[in-house]
Image (spheres, rainbow, N blue to C red):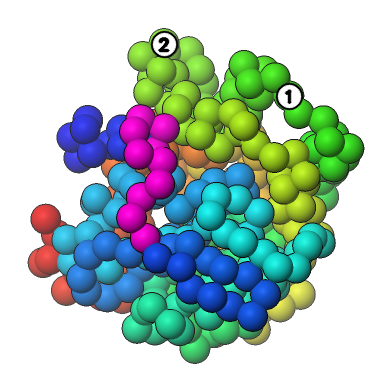
């Protein structure tokens, strides 16, 4: 992947990619779709919009049809039902989208909140999911993992908003590894992704999305899941330490664990998308060997 492809981000230009809207009973979902072939659906994390996956679309569009969407609470999604929302609600939205614009079962992947939606899709809509690839995920929030999110939610739910410069550096520390934070050029390359997600974030909507994550618990159902679940974890992930992902992989009936060294929670955006993309490609190739022959 060249630098131009690797560094594509909505913050660098058009933040409103061409897309379409599907109308569901209680919300409208904005989505983007690109490429031809078997379907990969990319679910954004909390506070992220569908254009965050622009580098992944570029890498996988030769040979795959890529779809992503704005979840409730961010971007162009319009919910006619106010919070609270649950991960089950987000998964129901995703299932409706897949039925309308994809050819299931699909390869389903997502980061953070998106990874929880991936888990729920595999558990509640297994007929729609060929392979589940949750990244930076866990089964249940406990310990520091829970206390940090509770503090963030309480602050945001009260209507407080961090100043933009504070917000960008605060969330960068939770999103990127020391390699990025200690390298000025890498930081300048990754900073637009953080600014795009958190620079002007609505605190009430942040709280609503994060609350859904806080309340989610898949631990009791994973042993009965028939969908292959390939957890991708990052060795320097402060938001979701790798041990949390390993629990998911070990609990799942058909679970697998992939640890990527030196990467942080958001390293697939701007930092090392090539490494993450290669891991995803290798996983898909286990089930769809012909995909290697269709690479651009």
Percent coordinates x, y for residue 74 in the rendering: 60, 50
What is the quadrant of the C terminus in the image? bottom left
N-terminal label among 1 and 2 = 1
Q: Is residue 286 left or right of residue 86?
A: left
What secondary structure predominates along the stretch shown in magenta? Answer: loop
Does any portion of residue 64 appear in the rendered image?
no
Between the C-alphas of marks 1 and 2, the distance is 23 Å
Q: Which mark is residue 184?
A: 2
Q: Which residues are magenta?
A: 10-19
Q: Is residue 216 left or right of residue 243?
A: right
* Label 2 crowd (10 A; few <14 / some 14-19 / many >=20): few
Q: Residue at x 61, y 61 (%)?
A: 78
Q: Residue at x 27, y 62 (%)?
A: 34
Percent coordinates x, y for residue 235 in the rendering: 53, 38
Q: Is residue 189 left or right of residue 289?
A: right
Percent coordinates x, y for residue 41 in the rendering: 41, 66
Does any portion of residue 6 appear in the rendered image?
yes
Q: In the image shown, does 50 or 25 lie closer to the viewer?
A: 25
Q: Which mark is residue 162?
A: 1
Residue 11 highlighted magenta (yes or no): yes
The number of callouts visible is 2
- Residue 8 occupies quadrant: top left
Q: Residue at x 43, y 82 (%)?
A: 100
Residue 140 highlighted magenta (yes or no): no
- Residue 162 occupies quadrant: top right
Q: Secondary structure at mark 2?
A: helix
Percent coordinates x, y for residue 190 in the rendering: 43, 27
């Amino acid at each position: 992947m060249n630098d131009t492809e690797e560094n594509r981000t909505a913050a660098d230009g058009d933040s409103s990619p061409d897309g379409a809207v599907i109308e569901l009973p209680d919300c409208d979902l904005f989505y983007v779709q690109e490429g031809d072939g078997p379907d990969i659906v990319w679910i954004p994390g909390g506070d992220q919009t569908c254009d965050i996956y622009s580098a992944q679309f570029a890498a996988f569009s030769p040979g795959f049809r890529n779809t992503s969407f704005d979840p409730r609470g961010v971007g162009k999604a319009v919910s006619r039902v106010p919070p609270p929302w649950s991960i089950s609600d987000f998964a129901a939205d995703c299932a409706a989208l897949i039925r309308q614009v994809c050819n299931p079962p699909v390869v389903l992947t997502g980061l953070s909140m998106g990874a929880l939606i991936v888990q729920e899709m595999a558990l509640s809509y297994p007929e729609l999911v060929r392979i589940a690839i949750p990244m930076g995920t866990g089964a249940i929030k406990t310990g520091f993992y829970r206390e940090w999110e509770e503090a963030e939610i309480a602050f945001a739910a009260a209507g407080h908003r961090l100043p933009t410069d504070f917000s960008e550096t605060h969330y960068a520390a939770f999103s990127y590894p020391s390699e990025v934070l200690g390298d000025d050029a890498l930081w300048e390359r990754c900073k637009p992704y953080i600014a795009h997600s958190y620079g002007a974030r609505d605190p009430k909507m942040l709280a609503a999305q994060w609350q859904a994550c806080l309340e989610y618990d898949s631990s009791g159902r994973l042993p009965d899941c028939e969908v292959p679940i390939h957890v991708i974890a990052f060795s320097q992930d402060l938001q979701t330490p790798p041990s949390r992902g390993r629990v998911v992989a070990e609990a799942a009936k058909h679970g697998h664990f992939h640890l990527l060294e030196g990467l942080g929670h958001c390293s697939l955006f701007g930092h090392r998308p090539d490494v993450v993309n290669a891991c995803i490609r290798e996983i898909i190739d286990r089930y769809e060997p012909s995909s290697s022959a269709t690479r651009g």
